[in-house]
Amino acid sequence: MPALITGLFAEPWVLTLLKVIAVFAVVMPMVAYSVVAERRISAWIQDRIGPNRVGIPFTSIKLLGLGQPLADGLKALVKEDFTPAHVRKVFYWMAPAVAMVPSFVVLAVLPFGSMLGAQKMVIADLDVGILFTFGIVSLGVYGVVLAGYASNSKYPFLGGIRSTAQMISYEIAMGLAVVPVFMLAADPAWQAELIDKSTAWSKYIKDTGLLNLSNVIAYQHESILDWLMFKQPIAFAIFLIAIFAETNRLPFDLPESETELVAGYNTEYSSMSFALFFMGEYAAMIAGSALMVVLFCGGWTLPFGEFFNTPAQSLGQGLVHIGVFIAKIAMFLVLMIWIRWMLPRFRYDQLMNIGWKRFLPLSLANIIFTAIVLWVLHS
């Protein structure tokens, strides 16, 4: 029996399945408690108390309201699942799942740690990880568009149309913002030098493709000044703002825009269908924050000590790297929540103006500038 178990765990599909389960087990509580964090932070900003009652069921232990996600989830499950008669039913039911799934799929190619044993802490270590990421992220808008179309109502339809225009406007700038990152990180010269200097890094990035996300982390490992948020501040700013637009967060929540469109594409949804949209939004925030961490903030590394900035040689070191990655994601989540409750919503014409007339030319100029600097340095 021990030999059978050992042989089973040597199978690649078993190891991949374990990684999927582990990522799902971490992300789902993060989704739930991001909602609690949002409600508590907004309450703090507005001088309110926020959720602080729900704790352990059937006891007087309140746990600072940390049981609130359980109560909200249970409420969503037991509420009547009402389907309006006028909706296009097939698309109506498809939309929540289509909105939620891409956010989880994106996490498959993000290195959330260094190594545990001989296993890289990434579910699918693709050579074209960043292209896969952008291809999947762009699918999230279809859930919103389907919801707007299937609801057969004017306010959801307007929300769906807005989401389409918003995605087109900001995804181009977001993609162009990443180009300078890979112009720096995909240089084979420094990769060869790093492989020669470090056995640990040699095992980690050897034989990876130029667009592999592990290479981006390796490029940023030595110093905090190597983090691409400092080397590429324009790309970082554009990407950060574009993530707000991609996840429909204030000040870019035009597809929902409660003061104008009731609840936008959510208007005709209730119970678990609405909860799936809600989960999809927060899962998208987590995926966007994870992308920011990988591309601009050193991934699972910290800028001091070999323990934090080299691939793990022990189980404890590997678990610490995963903890560092999650902590960085949490910092970006707090930033996204804080900005939502501090800034007003842009007008629709302002949204389009920023995307097409500001970010697009700026991101192109940043690519040209980076190319010129690299040409000068290498000539």
Image (cartoon, helix red, strand yellow):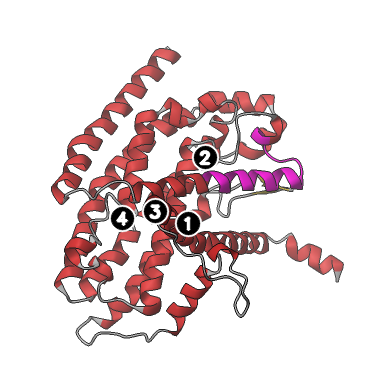
- Image coords of residue 355 (percent x, y): 22, 42
Q: CA distance from mark 3 to mark 1?
A: 15 Å
Residue 316 is inside the magenta segment: yes
Q: Which mark is residue 209?
A: 2
- Marks 4 and 1, how far apart at CA: 18 Å
Quadrant occupied by the N terminus: bottom right
Of badges 4 and 1, nearer the viewer stands: 1
The residue that disc 4 covers is: 248
Q: Nearer the viewer, mark 4 or mark 3?
A: 3
C-alpha span from label 4 to label 3: 25 Å
The amino acid pointed to by label 2 is Gly
Residue at point 40%, 58% (across, down):
48
Labels 1 and 2: the sequence-earlier one: 1
Kindly identify the residue that appears in the image at 36 percent across and 85 percent down. 81
Question: Magenta region: which residues?
Answer: 308-328
Secondary structure under tag 1 reads: helix
On the image, numbered disc 1 is attached to which residue?
Answer: 37
Magenta span includes 69 = no
Task: Of the two numbered discs 4 and 3 on the same chain, state the one appearing first in sequence.
Answer: 3
Mark 4 against mark 2, which lies toward the viewer?
4
Name the side, left or right, on which 129 lies relative to 5: left
Q: Height in image: 365 above or below 104? A: above
Instruction: Tell me if 123 is positioned left or right of 279 in this view.
Output: right
Q: Which mark is residue 140?
A: none
Local packing at callout 3 (Cα closer than 10 Å; few below 14, some 14-19, many 20+) is few
